[in-house]
Amino acid sequence: MRGAPAVSAYLPILVLGLVSFGFAVFSVVAGALTGPKRYNRARLAAYECGIEPTPQPAGGGRFPVKYYLTAMLFIVFDIEIVFLYPWAVTFDRLALFGLIEMVLFIATVLVAYAYVWRRGGLEWDN
Amino acid sequence: MGVQLPFPTPQIEYSLLLPVLVILGAAVVSVLIEAVAAESLRRTLQPLLAFGSLAIALAGCVGLWDQRQVVAQGALVVDGPTVILQGTLLILAVLGALLMMESRVDPAGDPFAARASTIPGSADERGFGARRQTEVWPLFLFAVGGMLMFPAANDLLTAFIALEVFSLPLYLLTGMARRRRLLSQEAALKYFVLGAFSSAVFLFGSALIYAATGSLDFAGIADAVSADPTSGLLLSAGVALLLAGMLFKVGAAPFHQWSPDVYQGAPTALTAFMSAATKVAAFGALLRVMFVALGGAAWDWQPAVAVIAGLSMLVGAITAVVQSDIKRVLAYSSVAHAGFILTGVLAASPKGLSGSLVYLVAYGFVTLAAFGLLTVVRSPAGEATDVQQWAGLAKKSPVTASVFSLLLLTMAGLPLTSGFTAKFAAWSAAWGGWQTGVVVIGAVSSTIAAAFYLRIIVSMWFSEGDDAVVVALPGLGTRTVVGVGVASAVVFGVAPQLLLGLVDGVGVFLR
Amino acid sequence: MSPAAYLALAAVLFSLGCTGVLLRRNAIVMFMSVELMLNAANLALVTASRMHGNLDGQVFAFFSMTVAAAEVVVGLAIIVQIFRSRRSASIDDASLLKL
């Protein structure tokens, strides 16, 4: 192993990739060969992934404003990960200072979260 | 694991950052209060927090008077110009907050909509009636915090963040007027679209400058510029875009189209604060960029700035003449003032710096007072902002008419007012810097503007007025704002050495 | 591939965004064009960061992404509010103010 560190470091990833690829191929092939082939409404419905598409008028129609509200809130809180990730990568080198600064940062974001929550921004039905 | 590079713990000089930290911290607390406190409690807590934090920040700012340091890993600079600009901004913020508190002039309540999310004219909106909303306070504090950071920023990243931190709340506040809400919302949309556009231009300019010089901090850019004075295409394009983005914020022609609409549509109390404070913050940052980062390339940007200065003065003065709304008149006159301040920038010398600073301080207080005074002259529909409605005002309220006349004369630059001190300081710097042509244009355009101001004054004193227009008795806050404006106009005019000495004492930008 | 090509691409994207803001009259489309300009700037920043071998540009790109998100929120809030008031998102329909 010591002779070829560059290759050996990536070997487990390669093996994992092969295993998962093999499992995926096996599942699809086995399902196609052994499963019953009946097509009905329930079969075509979304199953455990995504929601039923809302019926829409021609031209796409209009979304209620609450979609925008949810989307906006999502963007604002989602983007914080941009700062968390580099911090996580250099966590051990930034040491205590980095930890304190990050706690302050998250506390600030939490204040915004508290505001949204208390003002009813998270309630879907009203 | 990879190689561990040495990574020193960043040094943050908390005591030197006190004004900025106090205001931004108060803004966060203010959001928290909005989240948890009951509505009646919020109405007392929020103004208390705002004025308290402004007072602490102001005291901290005075304590920084002798400090000359680069702080926070080179992100910000605390030097003479920073301290005087931050001090001015904080005083303007206190005065602006006083105007925002005013609820006596309008029987419908304070200047802001009771609930900004209601649809104008709906039953929902009427249900909230004269209620006082408190969400303006966190927005206001964030805006002030960003403005404090902007002139202190020492690299393009900090400058961009500061720019956005003060711009975004202002877009929202613009759309929150209690009266004429459709107009106000429309002004907010225009301000937002054009403001976001100019921010993007600023950002792309920063990116090009970084590509050309490999550095974001002003000192590094200055080194790269002086090492290669034959600045390449990349750098020139970057500087042009950066300049355009900043000139938009100060409202210089031809980047001024937003300002009359926004000034007219925004709640007047906010217009007062915005017109004064945005200019102070943005010119502070512009001066630092031009003098510190691009001082070595002054020969390259001076012609462009000269053209913009001349254009601003002429466009501002000439367009003001044909306006019928007094808020638009003041907006165009602020475009002209941007041109006058640019004359000081143009000099690219310590004298130009102090001339610009003098102008900013003098202009800020007078403009704030002039807009503050607009709120007291009212018709049944709200503020009477049509120039014709101001005719014959002297018979209804000689005090209002005299004060407004004085403020207009100050803006025109009458000797023995602070306007003259300011123009003298800015122009003498430019004159010494061989920018004679621009000074001549300035003299011509201020004559045009003066003629127009005189027309308003004459109509106030010697015409018959509209009986529907009345002068409301304002509360203590508005009176203080107007009083400070008048005092600054007279004191800095009669004893200019007070202001000149103060500004000369601050020295130049720290590199 | 030389970094200059990426800078050129950024300039093209930026110009496209600029044109969009200046020519289109729908607030949402203008707004999308502004986002395009911001992302063009991000591309230029990251390219320049690679050219100069320091990380400042990448850090700047992170911050400008955050700012862009905040701008989206503020902008959509204003546009949605206007839309609710007058059922239109065209800049020209909003014309109480002189242009």
Image (tube, coloured by chain):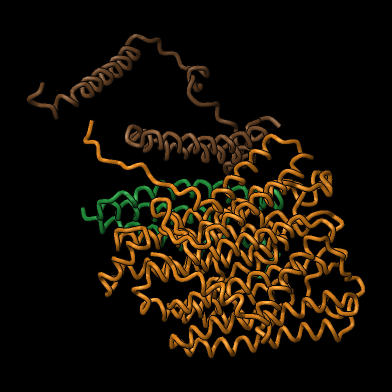
In depth, the one of B334 and B381 nearer the eye is B334
Marks counted in the figure total 0
Q: Colour of chain B?
A: orange
Residue B337 position in % (x across, y down)? 60, 77
Q: Colour of chain C?
A: green
* Quadrant for the N terminus of chain B in the image: top left
Relative to B189, is B111 on the left or the right? right
Residue B296 position in % (x across, y down)? 34, 73
The reply to whether residue C93 is in sight is no
Q: Quadrant of residue B63?
A: bottom right
Relative to A66, is B483 on the left or the right? right
* Residue that sits furthest to the left in the current view: A3
Residue B505 position in % (x across, y down)? 51, 72
Q: Is residue B69 above or below residue A74?
A: below
Residue name at image x 74 percent, y 60 percent: B99
Q: Colour of chain A?
A: brown
The reply to whether residue C15 is in sight is yes
Residue name at image x 65 percent, y 31 percent: A124
In depth, the one of B379 and B478 nearer the eye is B478
Residue name at image x 49 percent, y 20 percent: A48
In depth, the one of B15 and B23 nearer the eye is B15
* Quadrant for the C terminus of chain B in the image: bottom left
Q: Quadrant of residue B257?
A: bottom right
* Residue that sits furthest to the right in the current view: B467
Residue B483 position in % (x across, y down)? 76, 69
Residue name at image x 30 percent, y 52 percent: C49
